[in-house]
Amino acid sequence: SSELTQDPAVSVALGQTVRITCQGDSLRSYYASWYQQKPGQAPVLVIYGKNNRPSGIPDRFSGSSSGNTASLTITGAQAEDEADYYCNSRDSSGNLVVFGGGTKLTVL
Amino acid sequence: EVQLVESGGGLVQPGRSLRLSCAASGFTFDDYAMHWVRQAPGKGLEWVSGISWNSGSIGYADSVKGRFTISRDNAKNSLYLQMNSLRAEDTALYYCAKDQDFDWLLFPHDAFDIWGQGTMVTVSS
């Protein structure tokens, strides 16, 4: 089992806001990064650090963190945002990288 | 164009070995740490191993420690994963990924900004 916990599935109505969370004790000390993965494709980095977006990622994607929980928020979800989303960060020792189990986002 | 291309996957019997390669282009390879991440069919992402720019910091997931060895050749812009004593549970699509920092252990940001398309490893008799 992963040291980072994500809800397996989340849904959002088109154009509405959705928050995807990632929980783990290590998140009290380390930031999470977030990845979007569509079927048959490699993951894409969408958020890293405190709240940074790589070039080309729409500004409807944002990140935040509080206590042991990191969050990815999509403000005004689009049909093309339907995908699996993964967080990653450190394990409790800080010496290994771990991924969350992933959240399947459905846009209704 | 920034690109990572994995190769070396295939069907292998349990207990045998396989060596994966990842060819990098479009960026200064020896400025960045690199990682291997795998994804079993229908499952989530699993970090396998990471290596710093100068091979000074290396780490492995507990599931592969002692069996897999990561290495890099900066002169050839290439990353490698030597996989020994393969098991059925190692069956997965193996991705190489570029870190945003030069030392993954020193800078625990874990932002993997470039990924290859993956190479499939199937361990079966």
Image: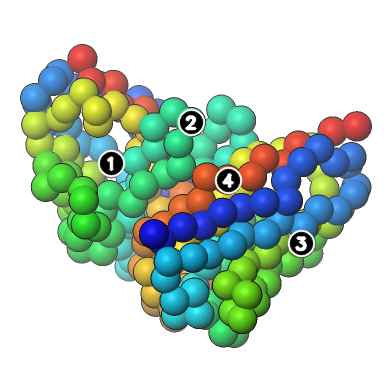
Residue A18 x, y percent position in the rendering: 17, 32
Q: Which quadrant is the C terminus of chain B positioned in?
A: top right
Judging from the image, mark 1 belongs to the subunit labelled A
Residue B27 x, y percent position in the rendering: 42, 71
**Residue pushed farthest front?**
B1
Spatial CA distance of label 3 from label 2 is 25 Å
Mark 2 Cα-neighbour bin, 10 Å: few <14, some 14–19, many ≥20: few
Which structural element holds mark 4?
A: loop
Q: Which amino acid is tagged 4?
A: Gly
Number of numbered labels in the structure image: 4
Spatial CA distance of label 1 from label 4 is 27 Å
Q: Which amino acid is tagged 1?
A: Thr
> Mark 1 or mark 2: which is in front?
2
| Residue A92 visible somewhere in the drawing | no
Residue under circle 1? A21
Q: Which amino acid is tagged 3?
A: Gln
> Mark 3 or mark 4: which is in front?
4
Asked which quadrant contains residue A15, the reply is top left
Mark 3–mark 2 CB contact (< 8 Å): no
Residue under circle 2? A40
Spatial CA distance of label 1 from label 3 is 35 Å
Query: What residue appears at the point 9 percent right and 31 percent down from the top-left corner?
Result: A76
Query: What residue appears at the point 24 percent right and 31 percent down from the top-left corner?
Result: A81
Judging from the image, mark 2 belongs to the subunit labelled A
Residue under circle 3? B82
In this picture, is A44 found above or below B77? above
Mark 3–mark 4 CB contact (< 8 Å): no
Judging from the image, mark 4 belongs to the subunit labelled B
Q: Which mark is residue B118?
A: 4
Mark 3 Cα-neighbour bin, 10 Å: few <14, some 14–19, many ≥20: some
Residue B2 x, y percent position in the rendering: 41, 61
